[in-house]
Image (cartoon, rainbow, N blue to C red):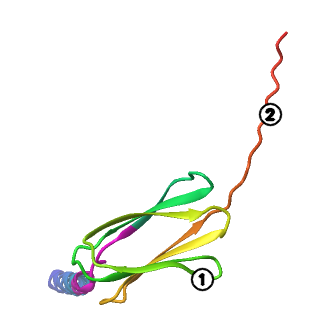
Amino acid sequence: MKKQSMKVTKAIIRNKLTGITVAMLIFANASTAQTRAVAVREPLIGTATVKHIGNPQGSVVFQVQYDNVTGDRFSLTIKDEDGATLYQDVYADKKFDKKFQLPQGEANKIKFVIKGLRTNHIQTFEVNTNTRTIEEVAVKRVS
């Protein structure tokens, strides 16, 4: 009886170890596949920023910066809310930094589109230029 219970115990342990080993192999393969998928991803080449930097004399000024590490040619297009092109030019600067002054109130939404001409990678920024006037009145008791 003791021999039979030992055989059963060994069989149970062997089955559990086999199950654990199979689970570990599956997990190891899954994590390897996941690592491979991440390694294949290509990093974004050049990232752009668009910042609002002021409203001088009835206009709106935006600063566009683009870190073009490779120095590839790219186009910059500024469009209004109807899709009409307000500005378009092609550059190849590695450290692009330019300010654009646009008339205030002409368009409520402006799109800045930067497109790599070699890679066709597109970065789009949509800017809402609604202007609101807030009038604040404060009443203070003096006596």
Quarter holding residue 6 = bottom left
Residue 39 pos. (x, y %): 22, 82
Say which amino acid is labelled 1: Ala
Residue at 29% across, 83% down: 73
Whether 137 is drawn above or below 52: the answer is above
- Report the residue at 77% width, 41% height from top: 135
To which quarter of the image does residue 31 belong? bottom left
Local secondary structure at mark 1 = loop
Above or below, 25 relative to 94: below
Q: Is residue 26 left or right of residue 101?
A: left
Kindly give the residue lying farthest to the left in the view shown: 3
The residue carrying mark 2 is 137
Q: Which callout, 2 or 1, points at the residue further toward the start of the chain? A: 1
Nearer the observer, disc 2 or disc 1? 1
For residue 79, above or below residue 141: below
Which mark is on residue 84? 1
Residue at image location 77% in from the left, 37% down from the top: 136
* Residue at disc 2, secondary structure: loop
x, y percentage for residue 43? 27, 78
Q: Which quarter of the rendered picture does the C terminus lie within?
A: top right
Please say whether residue 111 is one of the residues in the magenta stretch. Answer: no
The kind of residue on which mark 2 rests is Val
Task: Name the magenta segment's main secondary structure.
Answer: helix
Rounded to the nearest angstrom, the CA distance separating label 2 from label 1 is 41 Å
Q: Which residues are magenta?
A: 29-48
Position of 104 relative to 21 (above/below): above
